[in-house]
Image (cartoon, grey):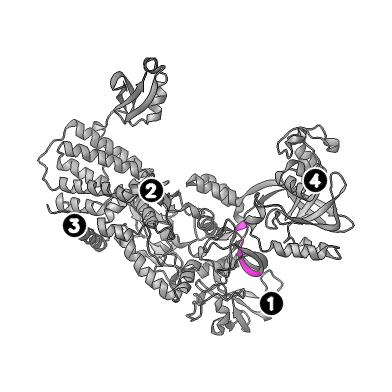
Amino acid sequence: MALYDFKKIEKRWRKKWKEEGIYEPDPSNPSSPFYNLMMFPYPSAEGLHVGNMYAFTGSDIYGRFKRMKGHDVFEPIGLDGFGIHSENYALKINIHPAMLAKKTEKNFYSQLDMIGNGFAWNHRLETYDPSYYKWTQWLFVQMFKHGLAYRKKASVNWCPKCLTVLADEQIIGGKCERCDTFVIKKDLEQWFFRITRYADRLLKNLDTLDWSERVKIAQRNWIGESHGVEIKFAVKDSKNYITVFTTRPETIFGATYVVLAPESPLVSLLLGDLRNRKAVEEYIEGSRNKSDTERISFQKEKTGILLDDVFVINPATKKAIPLLIADYVLGTYGTGAVMAVPAHDERDFEFARIHKLPVVQVIDCKESDLPYEGVGKLINSGEFTGMDVVQARDEIAKHVKGETVTRYKLRDWLISRQRYWGPPIPMIYCSECAKHDKSENAGWHPVPESELPVLLPKVKNVRPTGTNESPLASVPSFYKTQCPECGSDARRETDVLDTFLDSAWYFLRYLDSENNKKPFESRIVNKWLPVSMYIGGVEHSVLHLLYTRFVTMALHDWGFLPFEEPFLKFRAHGLLIKEGTKMSKSKGNVVNPDEYIERFGSDVLRMYLMFLGPFEQGGDFIDRGIVGIVRFLEKIWRGFSRDSRKENDSMKLLQVLHSTIEKVTHDIEYLRYNTAISSLMELWAVFEKEEASDESRALFVRLIAPFAPHIAEELWRNVLKNTMSVHGKNNWPEADVRYKQSKTISFVVQVNGKVRDVISVERGIEKDKVLSLLKQNSKIQALLKDRKMRNIVFVRDRLLNFVVSG
């Protein structure tokens, strides 16, 4: 048999697979549907990077495994091509975003094809295709019709470099996630989705999901449920009052001041003839240029300003206490007002120390322990003095007429963007209708569904204007229209939709991507969804994954879907580094998979990436390490170059083979690809020592097929002479119980190379567990007593050798 020509063989099989349509199940008639999905890729201008290939390969292995286990596997692909990142790069290289999209689309799909995944190419889609974003706009219209979309003036996050607003979730460490610029605040009219209406369901449903725990923790923290009490503090000599939210009403006797957020609407009511009004206004203006992350950081000094001659009445003590404005209080959380108890809250204590405000202790502890945030007996608390803190909580809340409430940190989803490259928001404003409309969205009407999509016009100048408006606001032919209700002259909305709405429903469209009458056909969708396995990046925990859950719940509530969670199982893949360092362009260590595929073939790169470490943790890409996989596949190819003369395999070979089948099956099911590949290497080593029959070699080919699909297909069809694909349904091997090795084995324990004991242990036992067992072994412990440990040699399933001196 000739040398393995991976370029020729891989290209041939990819072409053959497309011709045979083995990855194109009939969506309308599945017998055992399994929807295997990798998170929607963003097609960067640089093309597919090795991190993309790592994620896609891990997802594809699982899909191939499930197909061979008998499922109709649907593994679609498409491009999430709208958005700021694509637009910014297009502007940088002075090309129109639409032209760049077509260029990157061609390159990205070519690269995706090379890695050999079992994609259902006939169902591909791109978010910037009008036939797709027509239905993204339809989704917005449904949100509006069902009262979940609204427009209001709000203090919003603004990126001064991207020149657009950002949702809270698109800010990391106070910076824009796209350009790493510090975000500021602006008051603008914007469109929002009422995701907060779903906060309770979004939180409670997490307990039912088979998702990576770190993702569920991130969503719980972002939703941020708090159970507490709202208490009113009357403003002295005024009819106004300030409502605070607290989770510790029992400490109210220690509240020595109240703090308002700078953006609180109450501030304007209180300014009046304030003596220090100018200073207060300057402080408020200064706070607008800080991100929320900066404002609440414990590392930042707590700034604030007193409202001269304005006091509020503590409802517990009836004493007048000062009122301040401070930027460490956020108007978007709770009520935007805090009762400060500096003796029992670290943040309040630090603020009181800096601004010389009084500290009153109400929980018994040493003064040196302040601020004390624990429990204990109440002191300085009137009639409640001496009571236990926990027992007094409800009674004090009732005493001050507090109202028990549940609050969430989650804020409504800011959906509008002042950019060009996105789906136009399908809304029309009519000033005539607004005169007679007293509703929340007075004068606003959705574009009739029959007129969708609202096409993104092809304009020359797509640069953001910095005027708080989209470039579409300077295109009269786009925004001038007639009111769909009264026929008067009207104006289209010129903002575009957040790209995260594009990706919040794409998994529904894949199955019926050519439907021009509906976003999806319920009859088909209901057979395949929810998605069986979803794999993606943990960085989307509170962006894409949260938004998608919200949109799915809304579609369920409107009667379009029978389920309210989109993904039955989600696993977050790990992160790759290069030679011990995070990959980045500035360091020049980004791995381009094209180069490695050109040199070694996609099967080698697929297997090497999966061998680097646990799939959910990632690994270190070291160039010299790939040679080991090259040699492994070359050994397999050479091994099949000789016809097997063996008809009956030895018991030892069969035991190893069927134990490997069992282990690889288990490892793939739990995404432990690195250990599965290791087991295959060990099995092949046995095949090299002892010739295997064609029957056993065929089992090996089936085991390696998900990892190295091209070479497996070549061996299966052209060497072993099978007519059907190795990647077909019901082709995964089952371990024969007759040859399964015992779960327990005899394990040798040595001291300085001499056998000192033989113990019975579970097969596959780890080194630390063996050491733990030997701590109870009196014979071995006596031999090790008073001797210096030099080394411990461990050989899995065989022996452990203590190397000692003295």
Specify the amino acid type for callout 1: Ala
| Label 2: how many Cα within 10 Å (few below 14, some 14–19, many 20+) | some
Horizontal side of 378 relative to 803 (left or right) equals right
How far is disc 4 from disc 3 in space, using C-alphas?
78 Å
Q: Nearer the viewer, residue 753 or 739?
A: 753
In the picture of the structure, the residue carrying the numbered disc 4 is 255
Asked whether residue 779 is drawn in magenta, I would say no
Examine the rendered structure and indicate whether residue 384 appears above or below residue 501.
above
Q: Nearer the viewer, residue 393 or 628?
A: 628
Residue 282: where, in percent of width, then height? Answer: 75, 65
Residue 205 seen anywhere in this rendered image of the structure? no
Number of numbered callouts drawn: 4
Q: Secondary structure at mark 2?
A: strand
Q: Earlier in the sequence, mark 1 or mark 4?
A: 4
Pointer 1 and pointer 4: residues touching (CB < 8 Å)? Answer: no
How far is disc 2 from disc 3 in space, using C-alphas?
28 Å
Q: Earlier in the sequence, mark 3 or mark 1?
A: 3
In the picture of the structure, the residue carrying the numbered disc 3 is 5
Task: Judge depth for marks 2 and 1 and give the one in front.
Answer: 2
Task: Judge depth for marks 2 and 3 and give the one in front.
Answer: 2
Q: Secondary structure at mark 4?
A: loop
In the picture of the structure, the residue carrying the numbered disc 2 is 620
Residue 533: where, in percent of width, then height? Answer: 41, 51
Q: Name the mark on residue 112.
A: none
Please provide the residue range marked out in magenta: 188-196
Examine the rendered structure and indicate whether residue 122 appears above or below residue 217.
below
In the picture of the structure, the residue carrying the numbered disc 1 is 434
Query: Seen from this angle, which residue lies furthest right?
Result: 237
Specify the amino acid type for callout 3: Asp
How far is disc 3 from disc 1 in space, using C-alphas?
71 Å
Q: Earlier in the sequence, mark 2 or mark 1?
A: 1
